Image (tube, helix red, strand yellow):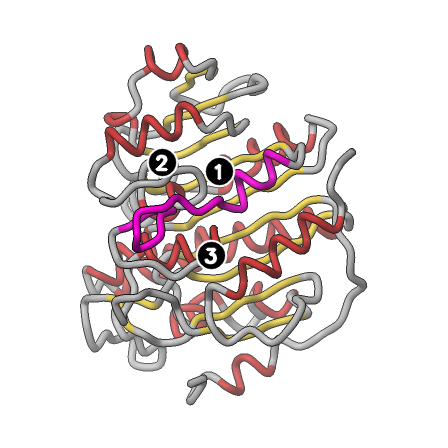
Amino acid sequence: MRVPRQIPFLLALLLAVPSGADSLILFIGDGMGLEHMKLAQDAAGAPWTGFPHFAAVDPSSLCGIPDSPASGTAIATGHRTANRRIGMLEDGRAAASLAERARGMGFAVGIVTNDLLTGATPAAFYAHWGDRRDHKAIAAFLFRSGLDLFIGGGGRHLPRREARRAGYDYRTSLGPPLGPKALVVLDGGEMPFLMDDPVNGRLLPAVQAALDRLWGDGRPFFLMVESALIDHASHDNDAARLEVEMRGNVRTILSYLQEWVGRHPETALVATADHECGGFDAGARAFTDDHHTAEPVAVLSTRPLSGEMVQQWELHGCLLEILRARTPR
């Protein structure tokens, strides 16, 4: 496992808290490598220091350097697969996801992203398809998933009529309290960069609305939150927009989630990334590439994670153990 220059940064994250949780929040920073994480810290500290447990894992793909479908599938299902496949093994078989397992165990389940809701990372938690670009097919999985809540972009792939036929309360704003099954489409495509639109680029209000809805359900819940535009800025080698995303969205959301979990200690919070993008160097504010890399990514948790994780797909078992520890009856 490679953790060269980042070792001192990771060692600064050690603390300790008790184990056991009724609900689980999983935060995924798309494209967020260890160097990207340094952008979220300043003289006042960083959200990472509030996590008592950490590991560094190698992203998982059968194709070497992973894309978001393969690494998202590894986290969501615990299986390595080929690039471009979503929730599906290399031989075409579907692999059950954390969200699907949680729903089967009686949990309320929600997904929040500033990407398309049919994008690779969120889709890995509800869809099973061989091509990430087939948004129409992926949307069909969303509509029949039965998950309680979706908030994000991608309205052009999610027709209102089909959503309502599937029993979803279709919204285009967070508005009043959300119904039992809600699909909130905040943009026709991806949500804007926070640097370009300081109002509509904020992901925190969506996270707050999701927690209000899921917590108010009265059941244990599983919530997956993706901050996707880290990856977009890194592909563009845009250090300015990347820094605003890391400070204005990632830092703000994780600080809020840690505070929320502090008030609801029965909830576990785990933060990770699907892969690194851009070969970013925080000290130089520079990129060495405009694609994904095989650099390790962090796993940070408010609860102990069982075993010694080296590969990304091993995280799935740890998350599933948290869900199974408090399966509702």
Q: Distance between the residues labelled 1 and 2?
A: 8 Å
Query: Which labelled disc corresponds to residue 117?
Result: 2
Q: Residue at x 74, y 51 (%)?
A: 325
Looking at the picture, does residue 128 appear above or below residue 295?
A: above
Give coordinates of residue 277: x percent, y percent: 29, 66
Q: How far apart are marks 2 and 3 (CA)?
A: 17 Å
In-image side of 303 versus 49 (left or right) = right
Nearer to us: label 2 or label 3: 3
Query: Which labelled disc corresponds to residue 142?
Result: none
Looking at the picture, does residue 293 appear above or below residue 273?
A: below
1 and 2 marks in contact (CB < 8 Å) = yes
In-image side of 21 versus 206 (left or right) = right
Which of the two discs, 1 and 3, labels the residue nearer the N terminus?
3
Q: Which residue is drawn at 32% across and 78% down?
A: 281
Q: Which one is nearer the viewer's eye here, 140 or 222?
A: 140
Query: Which labelled disc corresponds to residue 111?
Result: 1
- The region drawn magenta spans 85-104
Main secondary-structure element of the magenta-colored stretch? loop
Query: Quadrant of the rendered structure where residue 106 is?
Result: top right
